[in-house]
Image (cartoon, rainbow, N blue to C red):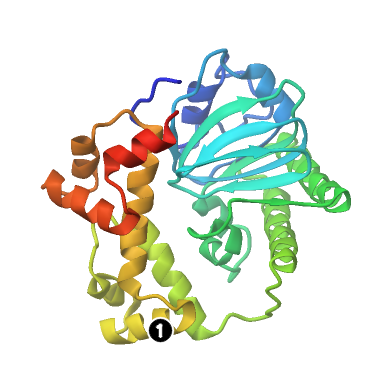
Amino acid sequence: MKARTKPTLIRDPNDFRQQYLSVPGHIPCNLGSSRTKNFFEAVPLEKLKALHKNKPFVSTRRNFYTLVLLTRGRIQETIGFTSYEFGANTLYFIPENQLHTIEHWSSDVKGYHCIFDSDYFLLCLRNQVKLNHYPFFQPDSEPFMKISETEAGALLELFHKMHFEYCNRKHHNDDLLVRMYLNILLIEIERIYRHKHSTDTNSIPRKQQLSTQFRKLVSQHFLQKRQVSDYAALLYVTPHYLNDTVKEITGRSASEFIYEEMIREAKSQLIQTASTVTQIAAELNYSDQSYFCRFFKKHTGQSPQEFRKKHLH
């Protein structure tokens, strides 16, 4: 079993290269690699694989979004508290701040690895959909989808175009086409995703928007904000209206989503880190470890120690 350590924070492309690559500075088209905000990179998987460090990777938390199109080979990764094995013609997603571990990439991987932060996306087009409205970046969504050969080919062409335009920039800000292609790529992925999940809707009703915004805020602030009233204040509605709306749209109370995010984070840390239960409780802002253990058992049916033992073979 691989040794577990505290997750490493990866804030930008520089951190990414230091964490994963044997020659951190050696990566194609890294003009602007000193950027720590408003950044983007799209690199063929086979080029990243060739530069991977020859040692196991630790768990990380990325402060940006990741899209990976796998057209050949196999990839094993842990996203949150679930381990996945991806094969050819798979697209998978890592939302910002998600706990994540690269377990294994086969030697024959092909496809594209794309990272960007929210600032870069916001400059794509005016008044475009917010990142958290894309279903594949929402906290409770499956972080991957199998796609057809035709769909993979169409998406691969967009990745190629982004990569080409990014590599042929004359200066840091000469990437209008890259931003536009990124916007088109996300729209195309959303179209495929919604078709596969049978969600045919041209507009998002206000109540659904409110529910989505609430869940996005919970995923960002659950460590500091534990009350429905905290999120109601951020959304400029009353706690009662927020709870009723979330209940109407999802069938669950607003507080359940707050608890669920706490449990998801606890599970992720129990599986992907070597932190003790006491340390995890402290990181989740529980001053009393016993209270944290009771909370965890109430919502999972097992103690933190039992959960860790069951999932680490």
- Please tell me which residue is depicted at 24% across the width and 63% down the height of the picture: 226
The one nearer the camera, 126 or 47, is: 47
Q: Is residue 32 left or right of residue 300?
A: right
Residue sitting at x 36%, y 85%: 244
Residue 73 in view of the camera: yes
Answer yes or no: is residue 285 visible: no
Tell me: residue 265, above or below residue 11: below
Q: Quadrant of residue 49?
A: top right
Q: Is residue 195 above or below residue 8?
A: below
Q: Residues within 10 Å of mark 1 (few under 14, many from 20)?
A: many
User: Where, by quadrant of the figure, is residue 61 drawn?
Assistant: top left
22 or 299, nearer to the observer: 299
Position of 67 with respect to 214 (left or right) is right
Left or right of 177 in this view: 303? left
* Residue bearing the label numbered 1: 245
Rendered location of residue 259, percent (x, y): 31, 61
Please, is residue 76 above or below residue 98 in the view? above
Query: Where residue 148 sits in the image (x, y, percent)?
Result: 83, 52
| Residue type for callout 1 | Thr
Q: Position of residue 262 (x, y in %)?
A: 31, 54
Residue 15 placement (x, y as % from top left): 46, 29
**Image quarter in which the C terminus is found:** top left
| Residue at position x 53%, y 14% in the image | 55
User: Residue 12 versus residue 101: which sits nearer the camera?
Assistant: 101
Q: Is residue 267 left or right of residue 69?
A: left
Q: Which is nearer the eye, 36 or 246?
A: 246
Identify the residue shown where x is 22% and y is 55%. 295
